[in-house]
Image (tube, grey):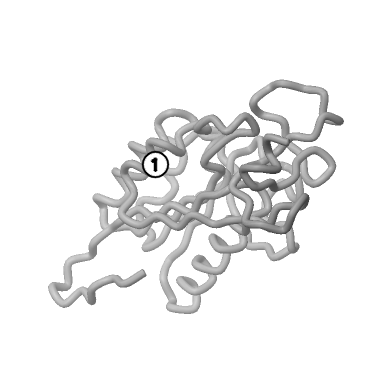
C-alpha cells in the first residue's frame, strides 16, 4: 500500500479494511499494523466487541497466539467517545458490531485518524457478514487475505462450518473444532 507523504501538515484520516475467511490471518495482520504504528510513536487505541471472548476477554489474540491489549466495547459509539484524541484506531471482529460502525469509522477518519478494521467478509453460508460490506464500500484501502483449504491445499476464501456444530445461528463463536477454511470447490463438496 502506497500512501503519499503528507507535506501540507494537515492530518489526513482514512479507513483500511482487512477481510477474509476464518484462519486467513486477519487479526495477525491487524496486530502487525498496530504494532508498527506504536513503534512510530503514534497514539493507538484498539477495540473489540465484548462478544469476542474466545482467547482472552481483554486482548486481541490471533490464532498463532500473537496478542495486543484492547478495550472490549458493547457498541461502536463507545469507540467514537474513547478514541477522539488518537492517531490510529484498530477494530477487530468488525462483523460483530452494530450498524453504526461504518459511520463511526467515517467520523474518525474525518478527524484525521487512521482507522484499521479487521473482520470476516462472509458468514459460513457465504453471505455478507454484518457491517463488513458497508465498511468495504467506504474503505480507502482493502486487503483480502486467504487461508489454506484443509481439504485440498488450495487458497481458501470460505469459512466452512462443520456438521458437528449442529447449529444454524449466524453467530457461533468457535475455532477449528467448529470451522475450517475451504476453497470454493471443497466448500461445495
The quadrant of the image that shows the C terminus is top right
Q: Is residue 185 left or right of residue 112?
A: right
Residue plotted at (59% across, 40% down): 49
Q: Is residue 155 left or right of residue 91?
A: right
Q: Is residue 73 above or below residue 44?
A: above
Residue lying at the far top of the rendered structure: 168
Residue 77, position in %: x, y?
A: 42, 35
Q: Is residue 147 above or below residue 185?
A: below
Residue plotted at (72% across, 42% down): 53
User: Residue 3 is drawn in which quadrant?
Assistant: bottom left
Q: How many numbered circles are shown?
A: 1
The quadrant of the image that shows the N terminus is bottom left
Residue plotted at (66% across, 29% down): 171
Q: Is residue 33 left or right of residue 172?
A: left
Nearest the viewer among 186 and 27 is: 186
User: Residue 13 is drawn in which quadrant?
Assistant: bottom left
Which secondary structure lies at badge 1? Answer: helix
Nearest the viewer among 87 and 4 is: 4
Residue 172, position in %: x, y?
A: 72, 30
Residue 146, position in %: x, y?
A: 58, 56
Query: Would you name the residue on which mark 1 appears?
Result: 135
Residue plotted at (65% across, 42% down): 185
Residue 156, position in %: x, y?
A: 63, 51
Amino acid at each position: 500500500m502506497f500512501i503519499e507523504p503528507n507535506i501540507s501538515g494537515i492530518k489526513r484520516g482514512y479507513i483500511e479494511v482487512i477481510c477474509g475467511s476464518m484462519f486467513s490471518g486477519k487479526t495477525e495482520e491487524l496486530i502487525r499494523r498496530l504494532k508498527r504504528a506504536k513503534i512510530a510513536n503514534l497514539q493507538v487505541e484498539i477495540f473489540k466487541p465484548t462478544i469476542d471472548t474466545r482467547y482472552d476477554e481483554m486482548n486481541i489474540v490471533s490464532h498463532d497466539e500473537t496478542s495486543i491489549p484492547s478495550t472490549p466495547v458493547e457498541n461502536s459509539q463507545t469507540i467514537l467517545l474513547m478514541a477522539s484524541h488518537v492517531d490510529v484506531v484498530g477494530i477487530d471482529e468488525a462483523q460483530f458490531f452494530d450498524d453504526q460502525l461504518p459511520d463511526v469509522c467515517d467520523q474518525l477518519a474525518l478527524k484525521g485518524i487512521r482507522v484499521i478494521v479487521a473482520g470476516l467478509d462472509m458468514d459460513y453460508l457465504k453471505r455478507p457478514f454484518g457491517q463488513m460490506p458497508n465498511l468495504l464500500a467506504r474503505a480507502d484501502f482493502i486487503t483480502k487475505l486467504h487461508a489454506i483449504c484443509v481439504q485440498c491445499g488450495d487458497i481458501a476464501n470460505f469459512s466452512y462450518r462443520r456438521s458437528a456444530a449442529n447449529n444454524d445461528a449466524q453467530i457461533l463463536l468457535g475455532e477449528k473444532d467448529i470451522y475450517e477454511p475451504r476453497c470454493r470447490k471443497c466448500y461445495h463438496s
